[in-house]
Image (tube, helix red, strand yellow):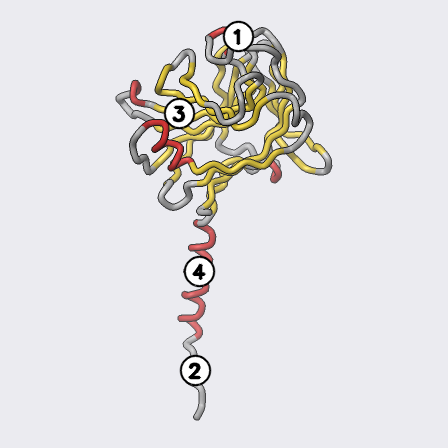
Amino acid sequence: MSRPRVHEPLVALIAASSFLVAAAATVPVGEFSQRKLDGWESNAFKGKTDYALVTLNERTVLRAQSYASASGLVRKIRVDLDQTPYLNWSWCIENTLGELDEQSKSGDDYPARIYVVVSGGLAFWRTRSLNYVWASTMAQGKTWPNAFAGNNVIMLAQRSGTAELGQWRQEKRDVRADLKAYFGESIRHIDAVALMTDTDNSGRSAVAYYGDIYFSAQ
């Protein structure tokens, strides 16, 4: 018995469909290793943190240098957390900021932070944010409301202290689960991702490096 012939266009269609599913499994946000800053916009609060693509150990990364300044980079991008709930990134810092009360306005500084934003639209007071920070004093895993924005902005110490200075760390967070845990509701979409190295309140300085940022299905 001869084998039935598979229709070639159908095979191509199935292959294309499989590619689309695979492609949708990750959503690039920051492609710094490709020397890309497309879509990132500067947002200054006080002074200007210097952001630049640099080569470090034969790898292109984003360097942030802050001298008593606070400005960030924002990428407006709508991500469906039902499809890709995991935020992935890598980072490295050269120094922490010493003894700060990071729950106070005078100590609301971090050598590195990456955060996601859920827009409130016209109801701007409903805008919420989760900030994953490399803390100087708060213990790893601790959370607290931002000193300026209150419960609309939750800070989470993803890393803390000086033990890992100069070491690259790869991170993964289930943003959908975190939003549910800290804001008490199921949120399907985030509307922006931002990063910031800021030292304006303490008047100190910090240097940090950020690797690629992306969302994934797993």
Q: Residues within 10 Å of mark 3 (few under 14, many from 20)?
A: many
Task: Say what amino acid the circle numbered 3 marks.
Answer: Ser
Looking at this view, name the residue that lies furthest to the bottom. Answer: 1
Q: Which residue is mark 3?
A: 129
Q: Which residue is mark 2?
A: 5
Q: Residues within 10 Å of mark 2 (few under 14, many from 20)?
A: few
- Mark 2 or mark 3, whichever is nearer to me: 3
Q: Which residue is mark 1?
A: 201
- Mark 4 and mark 2 lie on one chain; the one further toward the N terminus is 2
Q: Report, in whole angstroms, how far the alpha carbon at label 1 lies from the one at label 2.
A: 71 Å
The residue lying at 36 percent from left, 27 percent from top is: 182
- Mark 4 and mark 3 lie on one chain; the one further toward the N terminus is 4
| Percent x, y of residue 43 | 48, 19
| Percent x, y of residue 89 | 54, 35
In the structure shown, which secondary structural element does the residue marked by tag 3 occupy? strand
Disc number for residue 18: 4
Task: Say what amino acid the circle numbered 2 marks.
Answer: Arg
- Mark 1 or mark 4, whichever is nearer to me: 1
Question: Which is nearer the eye, 28 or 148?
Answer: 148
In the structure shown, which secondary structural element does the residue marked by tag 2 occupy? loop
